[in-house]
Amino acid sequence: MIDVSCFAGQGPLVLPRFSTPEAVEARLRGAGVTRAAVSPMAALFDPAATDEFAGSEFFRVVPIVDPACPADRLADYRRRGYPAVRISPGSHRYRATEAAELKRTSTPMIVAGARVPELRTILGESPDSVLADLSLAEEPDVLRRAVAAHGAHRLLTGTHAPFLTPVAAARKLTAARLGPDDHAAVSHLNAERLGF
């Protein structure tokens, strides 16, 4: 399983001993995660925050951007080899639909923490370069329903660690009882297609 929505570093609401890169990696590996797309915790509050994970074999950095992100910064992220960017509407206090201009770019984008009602708008009005993780989408049988409504090719597994327990994402995948192709797409193939 590849986790496309985790955070590491100092930040509020998480004890420091649970938010170090080493602690987050250990918890993710314990849940069956083989690689993770990480954003620095500081990026939740300052999208321009620098990363501290260069050279990691486990973590791949994903910058967080907001609707005001200039196109030249997105282009710079692509030149620097980032496989995707992430928008975090809940943390930055805007709706995912407000990032319409960003979603029209060719830069692969992960919508982090999309809620069930947002999925239709996010995926229905965006190009295929926009994918959503389901770390905060909660309702009975949410993953199976999301695959039926949107297709497996636009969905990603995210743990939202260290805020949430990584085991929940693994159990969400198991509980969905997806066919082998859809399970592989959501658990790792879509993330690999992005470059993770």
Image (spheres, helix red, strand yellow):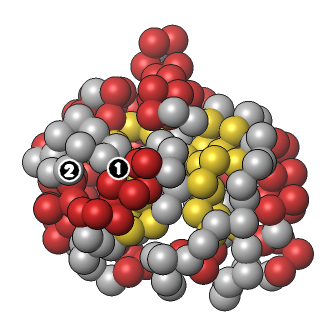
User: Residue 193, image x and y in percent?
Assistant: 45, 26
Q: Residues within 10 Å of mark 1 (few under 14, many from 20)?
A: many
User: Residue 78, image x and y in percent?
Assistant: 41, 48
User: Residue 97, image x and y in percent?
Assistant: 17, 65
Vertical arrangement, residue 48 with respect to residue 113, above or below? below
User: Residue 158, image x and y in percent?
Assistant: 55, 48
The residue that appears at 68% across and 84% down in the rendered structure is 11
Viewport quadrant of the C terminus? top right
Which image quarter: residue 19?
bottom right
Q: Which residue position is annotated with label 1?
A: 109
Residue 105, disc: 2
Task: Inspect this view and state whether residue 70 appears.
Answer: yes
SS type, badge 1: strand
Q: Amino acid at mark 1?
A: Met
In the drawing, does residue 114 fall left or right of residue 70? right
Q: Amino acid at mark 2?
A: Thr
Vertical arrangement, residue 103 with respect to residue 48, above or below? above
Task: Inspect this view and state whether residue 114 appears.
Answer: no
The residue that appears at 80% across and 62% down in the rendered structure is 21
Foreground: 177 or 37? 37
The answer to whether the residues at label 1 and label 2 have Cβ atoms under 8 Å apart is yes
Viewport quadrant of the N terminus? top right
Vertical arrangement, residue 56 with respect to residue 196, above or below? below
In the drawing, does residue 103 fall left or right of residue 156? left
SS type, badge 2: loop
Vertical arrangement, residue 15 with respect to residue 80, above or below? below
The residue that appears at 15% across and 51% down in the rendered structure is 104
Residue furthest to the left in view is 125
Depth-wise, is mark 1 or mark 2 nearer the camera?
2
The residue that appears at 35% across and 65% down in the rendered structure is 73
Q: Residues within 10 Å of mark 2 (few under 14, many from 20)?
A: some
